[in-house]
């Protein structure tokens, strides 16, 4: 269908690097704790928790780490109280940016976000300033050797897909958030298809094209945001 997303591809590669150095473990443990706190510790009754547990398995996180995180969320073990908070604004080249964070100190985190945005020539906005440019969707990243977009479309005719994008050897499928688990299951039944990630994301309605130089500056800014310890996810309309 449409072209690739530079940030989505970079973020996918960066996630693999973060997993190797343990940074992904720290962020995922935080998220599991909060999701278990808000929705309960039973993955059968908490689809978001089930998805995070599958993500933990995919990056080889020890089961003990996952179990402890769930128990901290449900109150069976003591733990820090993290609060979910979102930030919105504009970065270099006028790109729209949404940031999802988990923090135990809102004042510290908002100060850090404001500094990162302003240093890059951007600006941190009010809640709602850019989220109207995005839609909540299920997002799956996969390798499908020997298959093209038409093959995947035919395979997933029964599901509510909104887009399929291809970049090099990766396919990115966007679907109705509620269908994410079912689409993942359907893909995993097929030989030659490896689902590398499945999550819920904010996807830009109208991606913004920048020059190569401006795009490089924007990516540097996005990576700086993504590296912040309190930041869980960074979304942008950068094409």
Image (spheres, rainbow, N blue to C red):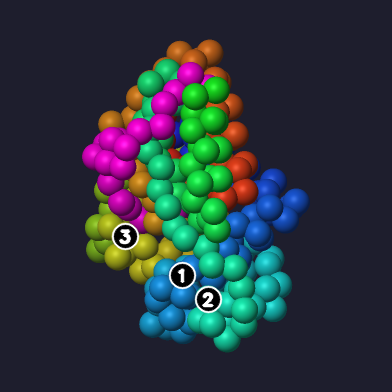
Query: Which of pointers 3 and 2 indicates the residue nearer the eye?
Result: 2
**Mark 2 lies on residue:** 73
State the image coordinates of residue 218 (x, y, percent, origin top left): 50, 24
For marks 2 and 1, the one nearer the N-term is: 1
For marks 3 and 2, the one nearer the N-term is: 2
Q: Which numbered disc covers residue 35?
A: 1
- Separation of disc 2 and disc 1 at Cα? 7 Å
The residue lying at 62 percent from left, 48 percent from top is 229
116, above or below 104, in the image: above
Which picture quadrant has residue 39?
bottom left
Q: Residues within 10 Å of mark 3 (few under 14, many from 20)?
A: some
SS for callout 3: helix
- Separation of disc 3 and disc 2 at Cα? 24 Å
SS for callout 2: helix
**Mark 3 lies on residue:** 177
Please state which of residues 184 and 198 is positioned toward the viewer in this rendering.
198
Over which residues does the magenta segment extend?
120-147
* Contact (Cβ within 8 Å) of mark 1 with mark 3: no
Count the marks. 3
198, above or below 170, in the image: below
For marks 1 and 3, the one nearer the N-term is: 1
Q: Residues within 10 Å of mark 1 (few under 14, many from 20)?
A: many
The residue lying at 54 percent from left, 82 percent from top is 75
Q: Tell me if residue 139 can be seen.
A: no
State the image coordinates of residue 115 (x, y, percent, origin top left): 54, 30
Q: Tell me if residue 112 can be seen.
A: yes
């Amino acid at each position: 269908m449409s072209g690739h997303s530079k940030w989505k591809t970079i973020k996918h590669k960066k996630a693999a690097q973060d997993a190797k150095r343990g940074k992904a473990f720290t962020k995922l443990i935080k998220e599991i704790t909060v999701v278990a706190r808000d929705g309960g510790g039973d993955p059968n009754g908490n689809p978001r928790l089930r998805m995070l547990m599958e993500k933990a398995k995919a990056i080889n996180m020890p089961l003990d780490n996952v179990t402890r995180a769930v128990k901290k969320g449900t109150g069976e073990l003591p733990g820090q109280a993290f609060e979910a908070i979102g930030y919105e604004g504009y970065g270099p080249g006028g790109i729209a940016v949404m940031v999802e964070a988990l923090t135990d100190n809102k004042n510290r985190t908002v100060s850090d976000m404001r500094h990162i945005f302003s240093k890059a020539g951007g600006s941190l906005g009010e809640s709602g300033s850019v989220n109207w440019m995005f839609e909540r969707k299920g997002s799956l990243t996969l390798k499908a050797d020997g298959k093209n977009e038409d093959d995947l479309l035919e395979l997933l005719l029964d599901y509510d897909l909104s887009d399929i994008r291809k970049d090099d050897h990766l396919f990115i499928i966007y679907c109705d958030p509620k269908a994410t688990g079912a689409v993942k299951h359907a893909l995993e039944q097929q030989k030659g298809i490896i689902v590398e990630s499945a999550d819920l994301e904010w996807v830009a309605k109208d991606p913004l094209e920048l020059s190569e130089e401006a795009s490089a500056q924007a990516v540097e800014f996005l990576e700086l945001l993504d590296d912040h310890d309190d930041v869980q996810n960074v979304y942008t309309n950068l094409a």
